[in-house]
Image (cartoon, coloured by chain):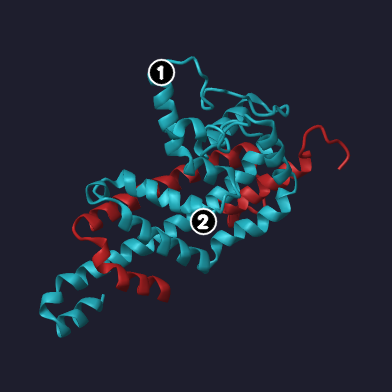
């Protein structure tokens, strides 16, 4: 099964392997400046178009019975978003490995091993003399951004800014898609009547 | 950048928090005054939750729209419209 070979996959929300920790740490150190240009990427029209097209293709692949559940569509939309991030951010990697981690958890539970899954490993973020109220907020923020539960505060901030930009783009693109589909609906409804009716329905 | 207790200095952290603030919805009215980091964090959490809820609602809407038709049928025209936008 894929379980054993996939455990060595890039970890998601905790630094399990030292090599990965160093790599991610290094990315973050130089990250503040590069992250700026990368984040603004989400605001470009090209990125939005790209996302929309990929989303449509992905939605096509959802099986009919699954497409009636909004959950699978949301999941699909998130995965396409994560793919667009091109593995540069932790939250995107976490989204892509979500299914895998869920399955691993299920397998672990079944075998009743005392294996501590990465989710349970509550590594506290680096405490920087922050008052407890701030600490709480940092923690809840870490829970909202995928895969960033045990991230240090600065890294969490970086991931958050990128995540927010990506989410905004996602909402924009999905809104456009919904409008197009809804508009198409009115068109398709009158397609029996050809010509003139189509013209009238488009005049919204 | 004198004290490097951690990988990031205090200044860099403040810079990141400011960048975060810019992304939030009413940032334009706030850029003059200094907002506490605590408030920014709270608003960030709320904003992310709101965005995720938006995506949720849109997913539901999409699932309704797709349930009534096969998306492969509208594909070509849809892609054309997307490209035009």
In the picture, measured across the screen, residue A23 lies left or right of residue B54, that is right
Disc 1 is placed on an element classified as helix
Label 2 environment density (alpha carbons within 10 Å; few <14, some 14–19, many ≥20): some
Residue A111's mark?
1
Is A24 situated left or right of A185 in this image?
Answer: right
User: What residue is drawn where x is 78% and y is 33%?
Assistant: B6
Image coordinates for residue B69, horizontal then vertical, percent: 20, 60
Protein chain holding label 1: A
Residue hosting label 2: A84
Q: Point out the image quarter for the N terminus of chain A.
A: top left
Please tell me which of labels 2 and 1 falls first in the chain: 2
Query: Chain A appears what colour?
Result: cyan
Secondary structure type for disc 2: helix
The quadrant holding residue A133 is: top right
Query: Eyeballing the image, is A134 above or below B20?
Result: above
Name the residue rendered at 45%, 35% in the picture: A2
Q: Quadrant of residue A121?
A: top right
> Vertical placement of A173 versus A98: above or below?
below
Task: Specify the chain shown as red.
Answer: B
**Residue B79's mark?**
none
- Where's residue A157, x and y in %? 63, 42
């Amino acid at each position: 099964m894929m379980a054993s070979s996939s455990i060595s996959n890039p970890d998601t929300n905790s630094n399990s392997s030292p090599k990965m920790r160093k790599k991610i740490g290094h990315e973050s150190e130089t990250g503040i400046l590069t992250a700026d240009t990368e984040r603004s990427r989400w605001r470009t029209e090209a990125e939005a178009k790209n996302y929309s097209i990929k989303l449509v293709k992905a939605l096509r692949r959802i099986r009919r019975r699954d497409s009636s559940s909004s959950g699978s569509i949301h999941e699909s939309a998130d995965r396409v978003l994560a793919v667009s991030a091109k593995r540069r951010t932790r939250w995107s990697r976490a989204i892509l490995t979500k299914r895998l981690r869920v399955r691993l958890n299920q397998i672990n539970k079944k075998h009743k091993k005392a294996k501590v899954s990465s989710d349970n490993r509550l590594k506290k973020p680096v405490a920087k003399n922050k008052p407890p109220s701030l600490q709480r907020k940092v923690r809840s923020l870490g829970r909202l951004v995928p895969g960033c539960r045990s991230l240090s505060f600065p890294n969490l901030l970086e991931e958050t800014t990128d995540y927010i930009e990506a989410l905004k783009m996602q909402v924009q693109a999905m809104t456009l898609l919904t409008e197009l589909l809804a508009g198409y609906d009115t068109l398709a409804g009158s397609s029996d009547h050809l010509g003139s009716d189509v013209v009238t329905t488009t005049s919204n | 950048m004198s004290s490097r207790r951690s990988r990031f200095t205090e200044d860099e952290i403040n810079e990141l928090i400011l960048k975060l603030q810019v992304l939030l919805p009413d940032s334009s009215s706030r850029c003059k005054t200094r907002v506490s980091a605590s408030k920014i964090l709270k608003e960030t959490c709320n904003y992310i939750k709101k965005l995720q809820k938006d995506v949720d609602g849109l997913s539901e809407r999409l699932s309704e729209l797709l349930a009534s038709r096969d998306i492969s049928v509208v594909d070509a025209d849809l892609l054309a419209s997307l490209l035009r936008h």
